[in-house]
Image (cartoon, coloured by chain):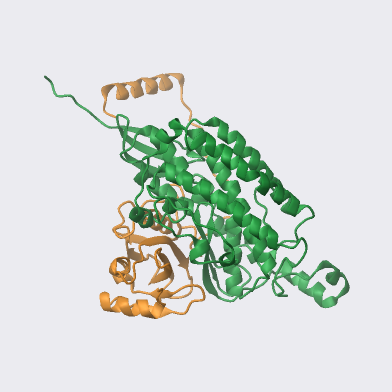
């Protein structure tokens, strides 16, 4: 029997004291907000408690609510496949350099999802084993989904200078790469 | 005897590789033929669709989100339209929902046919691809018939459908439904008892029930591992609860079970299409009766001042959507496609986030392939059915 958000919040408050779980009004699915510093404990309880059993994390949606405080809001979309029941868990993070603990230890699916949120919104997930950019190139600057990210309509196209190599340099590089391969250091 | 020195080999597979179904790059660590680790690298197709959507009016986002995934354009636009309609509080006429269901199932057939052809071609069974692409052509013709566009019909709109069904639609679909079961039989005959195919797929890339959920792979992949979760049954939309269909599930969760589940799903889709086609009248309502969102009919625009004003407003400034957020999942060919929409009350979305099943499937390739042979990676990639446009968005 799927529980409503108030019931889940009550269970969560009992299991994780200080989780600050609070039901929110929503038009689509049970939604609650938890305090950011207890997110990981709350998520572990949501997954492991037999009455809750949210065994799958399907998505993390980050929203930049520029102008509102706290500025960033993350929605974790959870699923209990057997019930079936859904739950949206929100955390609210103050900008401009938001931090929150990772949930990769609870759901491995969070690996790419958290990397995407870091890449596009600049939310740092403390404890993430491999927090690199996911969708944009590694050398990209800024976080495109932030509302204050400059939308560069009409910016000049950046190109790279073609590499100029003389014939001697070319031969030298070939030889060097052969030596490196031959010595077995790679 | 001197001690033998061994070392692992790092091999870069992709981004340009025929079996990666797009621009997926895998960095493989190999010990001989055995895969020790897989590091998927993605982003080569990132086009910032979600950012672009924030600059578009609500209705203009439909063709944008469709372009994320060339095999399940309809799922994307349907999830988006349903999410916005939920915020607007719109109720759809039944006929609109039936047509949406029919198109969703035709699209599932289309996607599974392409998946089947390319997946088994990667494993060496080239013939099947020729059969499946033949059938897929007919499904693309249906898209062309309804929308003039074969890949991205943008036929679903917020508030209903773009226009009424064209003449000849029912005959075209009935023709496909009549011949398709036989064609699926032909493909199955070529594969299900094919010794080479069985050896390439049985026990390869197995995934347990618990892992399928932990890695968020809800959809055909989790169903092959024995999770009976299907959005159409669990959280019905568009009136799926009134249709009669089964959800096929597997047990072993290996590449073969994922194949078997998808082939069974195709048969169920044919069943659903038949039921939907029965219910859809050739002519009738194709949009909600809501003057905020749906432009008035053309003959009224030409004769009535109020209708002309409304037509002009909808097409110039668009409509506004009440502030709030909504997430609506739909069962796409690859699993749960969902759309999370946030509105600030204006005429443009504040945030559009698509939940793409391919992203998590791509992440799990490492989990599935480790410990297997390098040749099995090709089978694993094919079996999780990733569309790189859907991964990178």
Q: Nearer the viewer, residue B109 or A126?
A: B109
Left or right: residue B68 compared with residue A31: right
Residue at image location 58% in from the left, 42% down from the top: B184
Residue at image location 83% in from the left, 70% down from the top: B301
Residue at image location 61% in from the left, 65% down from the top: B81
Total count of labels? 0
Q: Nearer the viewer, residue A158 or B370?
A: B370
Image location (x, y in percent) of residue B359: 45, 51
Q: Is residue B319 above or below residue B257?
A: below
Residue B279 seen from this side: yes
Image location (x, y in percent) of residue B247: 49, 56
Image location (x, y in percent) of residue B193: 47, 35
Query: In the current view of this chain or complex, which residue is farthest to the left?
Result: B1
Left or right: residue B207 compared with residue B42: left
Q: Is residue B288 above or below residue B201?
A: below
Q: Nearer the viewer, residue B43 or A148?
A: B43
Left or right: residue B93 compared with residue B260: right
Quadrant for the N terminus of chain B in the image: top left
Q: Quadrant of residue B182?
A: top right
Residue B104 seen from this side: no
Q: Nearer the viewer, residue B107 or A130?
A: B107
Residue at image location 33% in from the left, 80% down from the top: A10
Kindly indicate which chain is depicted in green in the rendered structure.
B
Q: Quadrant of residue B320?
A: bottom right
Per the rendering, the colour in which chain A appears is orange
Image location (x, y in percent) of residue A107: 33, 58
Left or right: residue B307 compared with residue A160: right
């Amino acid at each position: 029997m799927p529980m409503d958000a108030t019931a889940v919040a009550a269970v969560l408050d009992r299991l994780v004291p200080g989780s600050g779980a609070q039901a929110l009004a929503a038009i689509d699915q049970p939604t609650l907000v938890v305090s950011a510093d207890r997110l990981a404990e709350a998520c572990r309880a949501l997954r492991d408690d037999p009455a809750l059993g949210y065994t799958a994390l399907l998505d993390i949606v980050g929203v930049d609510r520029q102008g509102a405080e706290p500025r960033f809001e993350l929605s974790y979309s959870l699923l209990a496949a057997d019930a079936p029941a859904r739950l949206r868990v929100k955390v609210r993070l103050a900008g401009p350099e938001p931090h929150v603990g990772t949930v990769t230890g609870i759901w491995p699916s969070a690996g790419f999802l958290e990397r995407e949120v870091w890449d596009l919104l600049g939310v740092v997930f403390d404890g993430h084993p491999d927090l690199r950019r996911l969708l944009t190139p590694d050398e990209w600057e800024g976080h495109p989904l932030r509302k204050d990210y400059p939308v560069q309509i009409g910016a000049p196209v950046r190109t790279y200078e073609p590499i100029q190599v003389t014939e001697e340099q070319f031969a030298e590089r070939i030889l060097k790469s052969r030596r490196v391969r031959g010595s077995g250091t790679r | 005897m001197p001690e033998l020195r061994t070392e692992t080999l790092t091999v870069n597979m992709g981004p340009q590789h025929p079996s990666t179904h797009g621009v997926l790059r895998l960095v493989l660590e190999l010990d001989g033929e055995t895969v020790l680790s897989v590091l998927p690298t993605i982003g080569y197709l990132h086009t910032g669709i979600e950012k672009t959507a924030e600059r578009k009016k609500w209705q203009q986002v439909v063709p944008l989100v469709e372009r994320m995934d060339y095999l399940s354009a309809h799922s994307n636009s349907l999830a988006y339209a349903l999410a916005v309609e939920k915020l607007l509080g719109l109720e759809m006429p039944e006929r609109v929902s039936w047509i949406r269901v029919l198109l969703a199932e035709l699209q599932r057939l289309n996607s599974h046919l392409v998946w089947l052809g390319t997946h088994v071609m990667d494993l060496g069974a080239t013939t099947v691809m020729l059969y499946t692409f033949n059938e897929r052509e007919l499904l693309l013709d249906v898209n062309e018939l309804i929308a003039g566009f074969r890949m991205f019909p943008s036929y679903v709109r917020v508030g209903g459908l773009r226009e009424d069904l064209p003449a000849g639609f029912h005959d075209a679909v009935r023709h496909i439904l009549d011949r398709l079961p036989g064609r699926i039989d032909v493909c199955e005959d070529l594969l299900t008892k094919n010794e080479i195919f069985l050896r390439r797929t049985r026990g390869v890339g197995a995934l347990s029930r618990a892992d399928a959920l932990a890695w968020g792979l809800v959809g055909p992949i989790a169903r092959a591992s024995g999770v009976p979760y299907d959005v159409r049954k669990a959280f019905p939309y568009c009136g799926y609860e009134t249709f009669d269909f089964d959800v096929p599930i597997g047990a072993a969760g290996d590449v073969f079970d994922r194949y078997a589940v998808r082939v069974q799903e195709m048969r169920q889709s044919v069943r659903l299409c038949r039921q939907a086609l029965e219910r859809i009248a050739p002519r009738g309502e194709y949009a909600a009766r809501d003057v905020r969102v749906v432009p008035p009919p053309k003959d009224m625009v030409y004769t009535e001042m109020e209708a002309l004003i409304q037509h002009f407003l909808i097409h110039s400034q668009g409509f506004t959507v009440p502030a709030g957020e909504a997430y609506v999942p739909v069962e796409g060919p690859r699993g749960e496609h969902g759309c999370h929409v946030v509105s600030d009350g204006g005429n443009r979305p504040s945030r559009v986030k698509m939940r793409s099943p391919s992203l998590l499937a791509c992440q799990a390739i490492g989990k599935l392939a480790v410990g297997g042979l390098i040749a099995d990676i090709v089978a694993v990639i094919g079996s999780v059915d990733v569309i790189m446009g859907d991964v990178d968005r």
